[in-house]
Image (cartoon, rainbow, N blue to C red):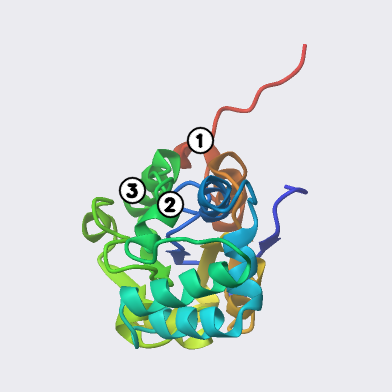
Amino acid sequence: MSDVEVVASAETPRAVLFDFGGVLTASVFASFERFSREVCAGDPHAVVNALSHDEAAQAALVDHECGRVEDEVFEEALAGALAAQGHTVEAAGLIARMQQDLHPDHAMTALVRRLKEEGVAVALVSNSLGRDCYTGHGLDELFEVQAISGREGVRKPSRRLYEVACERLGVRPAEAIMIDDLAMNIRAAQTLGMGGIVHSDAARTIPALAGLLGLDPEALGAEPATTGT
């Protein structure tokens, strides 16, 4: 599809790797924007700006996602970055409040189940944000294989996290497709020969993935195609 960035894998695909936030859930950035508007005087970009431009917050994010510092260290750094923008935000519980709108995307979790029924191997490859970010999403039932940055000590877009998932699945990276909401993570996967889809919503991703796998889109949960009369 023209409005989805789609890249074929170097070899016939046998596995699909899924990001978590923004792929199996609602948009991470929409959740951050809602929180920013609420606590930062209506500025929807305050959190993203802090994470993009404040060196201390950036370093704390990397360390946190790699499992080197706890939630509270990152929260203090982000609260400090927001304070530098003129916004007083309580640090305690900041991660949970930022991600309050990350509700499950049921079409995407159903896609995982359908892929397993079709004999396609699946894995979760995610940069973790907060010790409780995966709680209640049933990921252990969905994915036998998980490569989580905070557990592995390395984060996307490092190629190593993709390699860990592929090794545990028993496939070569060139036999895998990565679905992620960030283009830079797909570009990193491409350097290993992996295919990729930059995810925006299930209605676009499911048909695109079916095309890469050579499967019927409706078998993966896509809406039936309609024809004009």
Residue 219, position in %: x, y?
A: 46, 39
Dot 2: few (<14), some (14–19), or many (≥20) neighbours within 10 Å? Answer: many
The residues tagged by marks 1 and 2 sit, at their Cα atoms, a distance apart of 19 Å
- Disc 3/disc 2 C-alpha distance (Å): 12 Å
Query: Marks 1 and 3, how far apart in space?
Result: 14 Å
Q: Earlier in the sequence, mark 1 or mark 3?
A: 3
Q: Residue at x 55, y 69 (%)?
A: 83
Give the camera-side residue of 204 and 49.
49
Tag 1: amino acid: Glu
Residue 138 vertical position relative to residue 60 in the rendered view, above or below: above
Q: Position of residue 75 (x, y in %)?
A: 40, 71
Residue beneath label 3, please? Answer: 113
Q: Which residue is mark 2?
A: 24
Q: Kindly indicate the quadrant of the structure image that contains residue 202.
A: top right
Q: Disc 1, disc 3: CB below 8 Å?
A: no
Q: Residue at x 32, y 49 (%)?
A: 117
Residue 96 visible at all? yes
- Which residue in the protein does label 1 denote? 218
Q: Decide which of tag 1 and tag 2 comes sooner along the chain.
A: 2
Disc 1 secondary structure class: helix
SS type, badge 2 = loop
133 is higher (above) or lower (below) than 103: below
Q: Position of residue 173 (x, y in %)?
A: 50, 80
The amino acid beneath tag 2 is Leu
**Residue at horizontal 76 percent and vertical 16 percent from the top:** 228
Percent x, y of residue 147: 35, 75
Q: Tell me where residue 188 sits by quadrant.
A: bottom right
User: Which badge, 3 or 2, is on the more N-terminal residue?
Assistant: 2
The answer to whether residue 12 is visible is no
